[in-house]
Image (cartoon, grey):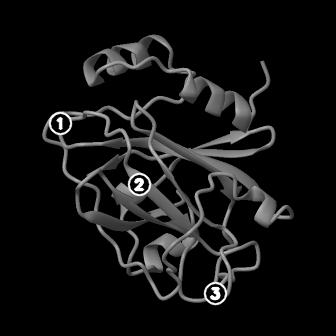
Amino acid sequence: MLNTRRSFLTAFLALPLIDAARRKAFAQTAPELPLTRACNDGDERTLEREAGPFFKPNSPLNSDLYPDAPGGERITVAGFVLDNRCRPLAGSLVEIWHADENGDYDTVGFRLRGHQFTDAQGRWWFNTIVPALYPGRTRHFHFKVQRPGGRVLTTQLYFPGEPGNARDRLFHETLLLELRDTDDGGFGQFDFVV
């Protein structure tokens, strides 16, 4: 089987609906699959970060952002939305926006902006590109996450090994994507706890 973004996403989406304890046991028997990180009851909520000046409300319902920037480096980002007791939160809003392959944000339309709702297992995913660097910031994605009836979490996710991480005042190591290289781009995973 090829090591592609699609194969990782297919394995991720094929996960059966299981509780956190069974998911951890499954992860130990099948480490090649992209599974959620170990989750312990009482996990702290995901850190908040500012939205920045480029947020625009009312993004389209769209999880495939790659066609907006077909010259960019492909990446699929995926994960779960969980409560602090490791339970998946179905129907949670997950919104993404980020810079393009030149380090610019679309301030007129909705290029590289979209949202979706988690499935019954609390899973979300976006096919997009790796954002370029721009002055003063390390490489990152912006997210807003809201469980049904809950408050909005605004945060940013970062890339491991980026030289600019240490200099970025918003960077925090708990917001690092877990990245895997594939034959056709990257696969990044992060689980939001809200």
x then y, percent, for residue 161: 55, 59
x then y, percent, for residue 189: 51, 44
Please say if the residues under marks 1 and 2 sit with CB atoms less than 8 Å apart. Answer: no
Residue most extreme to the top: 29
Q: Is residue 36 above or below residue 16?
A: below
Res 85 label: 1
Disc 1 crowd rating (10 Å Cα; few below 14, some 14-19, many 20+) is some
Q: Image quadrant of residue 52?
A: bottom left
Q: Image quadrant of residue 27?
A: top left
Check disc 1 and report its element: helix, strand or loop: loop
Instruction: Say what amino acid the circle numbered 2 marks.
Output: Leu
- Residue holding disc 3: 107
Q: Image quadrant of residue 60?
A: bottom right
Residue at x-position 20% and y-position 33%: 40
Residue at mark 2 to residue at mark 3: CA–CA distance: 22 Å
Check disc 2 and report its element: helix, strand or loop: strand
Check disc 3 and report its element: helix, strand or loop: loop
**49 with respect to 182 (left or right):** left
- Residue holding disc 2: 93
x then y, percent, for residue 93: 41, 54
Disc 3 crowd rating (10 Å Cα; few below 14, some 14-19, many 20+) is few
Q: Which of 23 and 134 is in front in this view?
A: 23
Quarter in which the N terminus is drawn? top right
Upstream in sequence: badge 1 or badge 2: 1
Please say if the residues under marks 3 and 1 sit with CB atoms less than 8 Å apart. Answer: no
Instruction: Say what amino acid the circle numbered 1 marks.
Output: Arg
Q: Nearer the viewer, residue 73 or 56?
A: 56
**2 with respect to 86 (left or right):** right
Please say if the residues under marks 2 and 3 sit with CB atoms less than 8 Å apart. Answer: no
Q: In this view, does 148 lie above or below 89?
A: below
Instruction: Say what amino acid the circle numbered 3 marks.
Output: Thr
Which is in the foreground here, disc 1 or disc 2?
2
